[in-house]
Amino acid sequence: MNRDLLGIRQLSTDQITDLLRRSDGYFLQLNSIDPFRKSSLLDGRTVANLFFENSTRTKTSFELAEKRLGATSVNLSMQTSSLTKGESLIDTVNVICAMKVDCVVVRHSSSGVPQLLRKHLPDHIRIINAGDGGHEHPTQALLDAATLQAKLGSLKNKKIVIIGDILHSRVARSNMILLNKLGAKVTLVSPLTLTPKYVEEIFGVRVVHELADEIKDASAVISLRIQFERQSRSLFPNLSDFRMRYGLTPLRIMETNAFILHPGPVNRGVELDNEAADSEKSLILQQVKRGVAIRMAVFEWLFEDK
Ligand code: ASP
């Protein structure tokens, strides 16, 4: 059976470890060979990037990974797609695939779209989930783990705190599953109104609603963007109240040695003050670098002969 990357949930711990190891190799190559010579791994392969929701860094990162592996990429964005003319998602995707595509990278605002495409597309077309609604964002969680491991070594028993809008965050979901599989101890810090019901039981994490001393003994903190686009009503009083309760302010980062991660885009002055985003503890640009390496590793894994 061909491989897909629909979510972290479908990956075993061994597969995650394998992907992280492969990505380390690509990360080293990307950083040490100048100029990086294109590999021929995806020579003759065509990858369709179907982004039905806005994206800058994830889309660019996938495109770079594809180009560095020698693939031909085609891009379809919501604005130019026939969906705006009333065609169904499946029809649009079938049309693209009839053009002999080997892999589809899909981002959509509805949860479950990659799984839906899996049911409709022929088996030989590989599917990568680049973020589906509030459900999963597997390559983000993998690149976060690669970034964390590079600093912390094994994540077993390491305290990782995820702060902010957990309810609407696919990044939080994929990270909770992945960090659990790698043995980390995950604590969520979020307002009650931005915390999914039963998250402790379902994901095996600890939940608190006040930041207090939580980050003082943490190995790393993953701060999340407030996902206004998925909120139809106001779930907290205002942005400055949110910053006071959950933001990484200069005072808070002085009290901890924890590394700081954020999937981007960052709302400076809300989730992270400049002092946090630009501090020595910030790994945000490392995450971006690791992102290309992880996506190269995912393509290698999807297309290797088994
Ligand atoms: N870039 C991440 C995502 O696509 C995080 C965010 O948008 O806040 O989910």
Image (cartoon, rainbow, N blue to C red):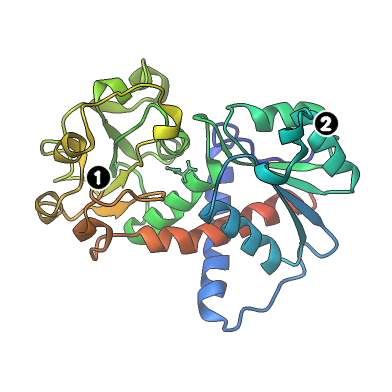
Structural crowding at the residue carrying mark 1, measured as other residues with C-alpha within 10 Å and reported as few (<14), some (14–19) or many (≥20):
many
Q: Quadrant of residue 151?
A: bottom left
Q: Is residue 60 left or right of residue 44?
A: left
Q: Compared to 144, does 116 lie above or below?
A: above
Q: Nearer the viewer, residue 19 or 129?
A: 129
Which quarter of the rendering shows the N terminus?
Answer: top right
Q: Which residue is mark 2?
A: 91
> Can you say whether 30 is above or below 286 in the image?
below
Res 135 label:
none
Residue at 68% x, 54% y: name it: 299
* Residue 155 on image: x %, y %: 36, 47
Instruction: Provide the secondary structure element on which disc 1 rests.
Output: loop
- Left or right, 90 with respect to 154, comes to right
Measured from the top left, where is residue 212 in percent x and y? Answer: 11, 36
What separation in Å lies between label 1 and label 2 (alpha carbons)? Answer: 41 Å
Residue sitting at the far bottom: 34
- Which residue appears at 79% of the width and 30% of the height? 87
Residue shown at the point (77%, 27%) measured from the top left:
88
Helix or strand or loop: what does disc 2 sit on? helix
Structural crowding at the residue carrying mark 2, measured as other residues with C-alpha within 10 Å and reported as few (<14), some (14–19) or many (≥20): few
Q: Nearer the viewer, residue 269 or 216?
A: 269
Amino acid of disc 1 = Val
Tell me if 89 is positioned left or right of 109 in this view. right
The spot of residue 140 in percent (x, y) is 49, 47
Q: Residue at x 57, y 81 (%)?
A: 33
| Kind of residue sitting beneath label 2 | Asp
Relative to 303, 28 lies left or right? left
- The correct choice, above or below, for 114 with respect to 148 in the image is above
x and y percentages locating residue 156 in the rendered image: 35, 44
When asked about the image quadrant of residue 207, the answer is: top left
Q: Reading the chain from its start, which is encountered first: label 1 or label 2?
A: 2
Q: Which residue is mark 1?
A: 270
